[in-house]
Amino acid sequence: MNPFNYSAEQLQAAALDVRRDIITMLVEAKSGHTGGPLSCTDFATALSFRILNHKPSEPHWADRDFLFYSIGHVTPVNYSLLAECGYFPLKDLMTFRKLNSRLQGHPHRLDTPGIEVSSGSLGQGLSIACGVAKGSSIDKHPRRVFCVMGDGELQEGSCWEAIMFAGHYHLDKLGVIIDYNKRQIDGEVPKIMDIAPLADKWQAFNWHVLEIDGHDIQQILAAYDEMLHYQGKPTVIIAHTTMGKGVSFMEGKSEWHGKPPTMEQGEQALQELGTTYDEWSSRLLAG
Amino acid sequence: MLKELTKLEMKKTREGFGHALVELGEKDERIVVLAADVTDSVNAGFFARRFPERFIQMGIAEQNMAAVATGLSLIGKIPFYSTYSVFSTCRCMDQIRISICYSNANVKVCGAHGGISVGPDGATHQAMEDIAMMRSLPNMKVIVPCDYWQSKRATMAAAYIDGPVFLRFGREAVPTLTDESTPFEFGKGVVLHDGGDAAIIACGVMVYEALVASEVLGKQGIDCRVINLHTIKPIDRELIIRTARECGAIVTAEEHQVYGGMGSAVAEVLVSHVPVPQEFVAVMDRFGQSGQPDELLRAFGLKSEDIVVAVKRVLKRK
């Protein structure tokens, strides 16, 4: 049971707050990834506030579901959601990427409540999720395991070892969401190293495949519902998303993969998101 | 003693590993074992047949195996993953670094077929960089047992050492120096033979070669201490410092590249505390090749005769 169980409207409001957090913490950090966190925000917010069975006050609760961000670099959305859920104070977000912060540039299990495993080197998260799912099936434990993957990440060969493993062992408590924003640092994914046709590939590896608009909350919730009920195979949701979603001048631009907004750009972004840097950083610092 | 040394029972270290897994599995439900297609070669098959529900066949996918093991550890399992040491370490170094070590995950990395004594398979299958790679990683512990019983004991101990542990075994049967009752103390080197002229510090199959060398040297009036340094990380600093003070000259002997292995680890202690002369018996920055195990040990300068020469060389610098 998710402790929040937000409605679609509440999830949309929460996602807006998360986008404000992302921009504010990146402006403060002067370093970090902007595009991917914004493209993940809608389906990730739905996971934390509607789907995931977790207890923010008890991060190591034994019966929890597990959520892995195999794309470690989306820490802004990962940390924002952990803080918004109550794993640690909101004000910690303003220490992101600074010396001695518990919020490292890429997530570190031993530093941050709610981070299940250290990551940042691509192509490892799904294997770890497979380990939790396989171990849970040995124990006949009903826990769910979710893994958020990137599209560029699928160029790492090790991903396909894990995809093969989950299909082979019919790990139907395992679900993957692919942030298919079709952008990576060097440019457009199809031009750098094409991963299409994605649905056919996963199907061939014995997965149940769903494709959705990753910013449409109704489609997101319907896909999660199907994922939770599907038996016999693991499910992958290919979420078609837009890099930098929610900020006009970032949308669809590869250059926003790995850089933060300047203060001026941040103000403009926050204005589009209905707030200001002063207002939102004050909210974080007070939290 | 030389006569006794030639009469020792020959047993495989990897079998000690396999038998320990079964014993562990019997008393602890949390033990799970993973293997990547070479299940019987690494003797994980003993466990696989006894506890099929807790054995995970990975196929030929070592990167996935290392990270799946990490996931298993996150829900309280004690995973041992196993294949040839070249594959359980080099092949998935990044998974070991980030998923296992940076997370301090409770994963046991097990490498069979360590060293040149792997034999005719040749360089690709002879792990000679694994100790260096594993000991460079924060949180990783490194154990290289010398015989069957020590392999068994070390494997049993590793299950209850918190965090990542690398266990390195060999392919061939080697003389059994310890017995069922010999204790294994993690992190503590063992003085097998006392002496004050020089000390030979060895690990793995080279412990036997060191004992033979010390016996040959004894007959020539050179009294050599022999130490089995089965735990390379954390290293037994206190024993090394005391030995250096008392013996004044050290020879290290290992079936591994000279760069970064056990000898380097000993040298790091010596130069910081008691900078006595040291000589290295190791593989001198080259790849292995095909051949019979004993031929290879000889060709690569890893026999007792080579240790004898190294002791005489280090004594000149004492």
Image: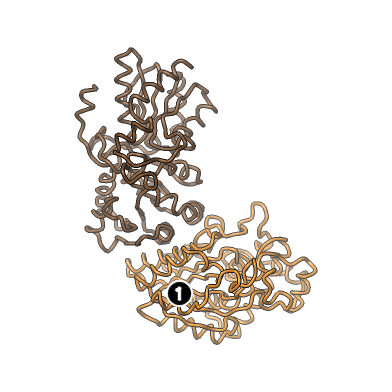
Chain colours: A orange, B brown
Q: Estimate the x, y position of residue B175 in percent, counting from the top left.
A: 25, 34
Q: Estimate the x, y position of residue A209 in percent, counting from the top left.
A: 45, 80
Residue in view at x 42 percent, y 25 percent: B251
Furthest toward the top, the residue is B221
Q: Estimate the x, y position of residue B297 in percent, counting from the top left.
A: 34, 34
Q: Nearer the viewer, residue A168 or B300?
A: B300
Is B103 left, or right, of B305 in this rendering? right
Is residue B233 in view from this perspective?
A: yes
Residue in view at x 67 percent, y 52 percent: A99
User: Is A123 placed above or below A235 here?
Assistant: above
Classify residue B256 by image quadrant. top left
Classify residue B62 by image quadrant. bottom left
User: Is A159 placed above or below B119 here?
Assistant: below
Q: Chain of mark 1?
A: A
Is residue B189 in view from this perspective?
A: no
Location of mark 1 (residue): A175
Is A225 left, or right, of A137 in this rendering? right
Furthest toward the front, the residue is B290
